[in-house]
Amino acid sequence: MTYILHNLDNKIMKKRGIGQTISWYFAIFCYAMSLLTIAFATYWQTEHGTQDPIFAGALASIFFFGSCGFVLHYIAKANLPDYNLSK
């Protein structure tokens, strides 16, 4: 049964387009930037405390990069229909 479903999924799913591939790489970039910003915020908290506006900006950047990475990852994994008229 799983073999049939696996083959059915492979026939339904199409290859990713160039836009989805670019979206995938930008998602990885956003995740990496989010991790770097977490490291920076941790450093800033230990050295300067949490009362600085820079720390608040770092927290906002963590949220921004994480959210962008999630949305771009979702777009990259979407099964978009093929509207090619030449077929």
Image (cartoon, grey):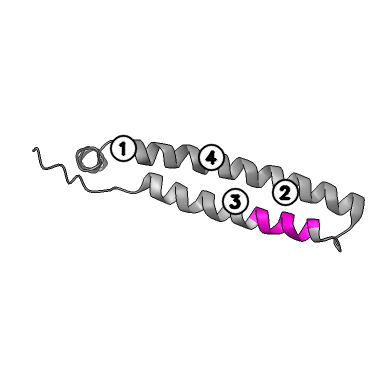
In this rendered view, identify the residue nearer to me: 62 or 9: 62
Real-space Cα separation, disc 2 to disc 4, in angstroms: 15 Å
Q: Residue at x 89, y 51 (%)?
A: 46
Q: Which mark is residue 65?
A: 3
Real-space Cα separation, disc 3 to disc 1, in angstroms: 23 Å
Give how far across and how far down residue 13 sits, in percent.
Answer: 25, 41
Mark closer to the chain start, 2 or 3? 2
**Residue type pointed to by label 3:** Phe
Q: Are marks 1 and 4 in contact (CB under 8 Å)?
A: no
**How packed is label 1: few (under 14 Cα within 10 Å), some, or many (20 or more)?**
few
**Residue type pointed to by label 1:** Gly
- Foreground mark, 2 or 1, reads 1
**Magenta segment, principal secondary structure?**
helix
Mark 2 element type? helix
**How packed is label 4: few (under 14 Cα within 10 Å), some, or many (20 or more)?**
some
Indicate left or right for 26 with 2 as reference.
right
Indicate left or right for 77 with 27 as reference.
left
**Which quarter of the figure has residue 57?**
bottom right
Q: Are marks 4 and 3 in contact (CB under 8 Å)?
A: no
Task: Report the span colored magenta.
Answer: 54-62
